[in-house]
Image: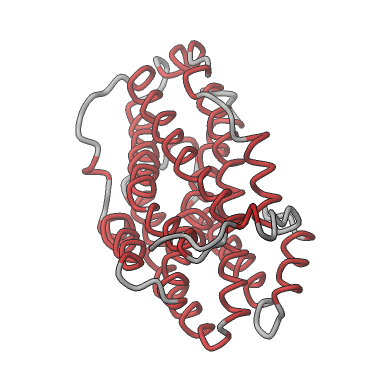
Amino acid sequence: MPHTSFTTTTRGLNRELPPMKLYEKAKKLGIWNPSDIDFSKDKQDWAKFTDEEKDLVWLLLSMFVAGEEAVTLDLLPLIQVIAQEGRLEEEMFLTTFLFEESKHVDFFRRFMDEVAEVHVDFSHYHGDNYRQLFYEALPAALNALRTDASPANQITASVTYNMVVEGVLAETGYQAFFTMLERNDLLPGLRKGIGLLKQDESRHIAYGVYLLSRLIAEHPSEWDNLQMHMNILLPSAIGVIGDAFARYEVVPFGLIEEDFVNYAMSQFAKRFERLEKAKGASLDEINKIARETEDA
């Protein structure tokens, strides 16, 4: 379709919108280079790991790098929908998503190549629950927007991507890495990169909360749809955690399954409570809540 006007020459940019605040953060905090991270100490640490310890790290890496690749491949339809709706401020922030998700693929694959030094097919680590989310639900939800950009489909896409994949699984994975590596002062390069990556993802999740809140404020009848998809996907996300722990008679690094299930559930509940505030709220109220609440 031809353009009839441009935001920047009519009303200008609304720099008070929450996505523009996130865009400012992305410009300051999102410019880090995986190639600059020093893995020299990581290589020394890795040489001392037991086979079981290496296996657990490979398991986590295989899920992270494939997950980051999946969102890199599947994200574009959401960006296109927001652009087609003329939400320039939101699209400007969303342009940082593809760059950052691609950078995360780069970071994890670099660690795998230069430190773990194993060039094999890691997909055997992907169990049924992982495959249900990343091989099926994620591409289905996002690619559905290509033919139907309805509020219902936008909600399904953001719930799948922002709330479950990023807000539950990825954050629980970060917690696992930090728990097993920080307490033992291991793999400082990997920890540094994951810290930077987590900062990127926190902005993505904050936008997801904002997008879903806006959609519910605009279309309150869609609340049941949002709640339904959160509840449908949560068991698979918790199942991924269970599958990981089930591999080991004695879990390396002393990790305890219950700790991570509880952490995942707390992240889910925290975001769900934020979204509940959107029911019956106006767009002005949604913007105010988003500006005042720092998503963690």
**Viewer-nearest residue: 258 or 33:** 33
Q: Residue at x 33, y 48 (%)?
A: 70
The image position of residue 7, as x and y in percent, is 61, 57
**Viewer-nearest residue: 212 or 149:** 149
Q: Is 68 above or below relative to 211?
A: above
- The answer to which image quadrant residue 233 occupies is bottom left
Q: Residue at x 48, y 49 (%)?
A: 170
Q: Is 161 above or below relative to 111?
A: below
- Residue 263 in the figure: left or right of residue 160: right
The image position of residue 259, as x and y in percent, is 55, 54
- The answer to which image quadrant residue 198 occupies is top right
The image position of residue 243, as x and y in percent, is 34, 54
Q: How is the image coloured?
A: secondary structure
The image position of residue 12, as x and y in percent, is 69, 55
- Residue 117 in the figure: left or right of residue 48: left
Locate the N terminus and report the quarter of the image it occupies.
bottom left
**Viewer-nearest residue: 213 or 188:** 213
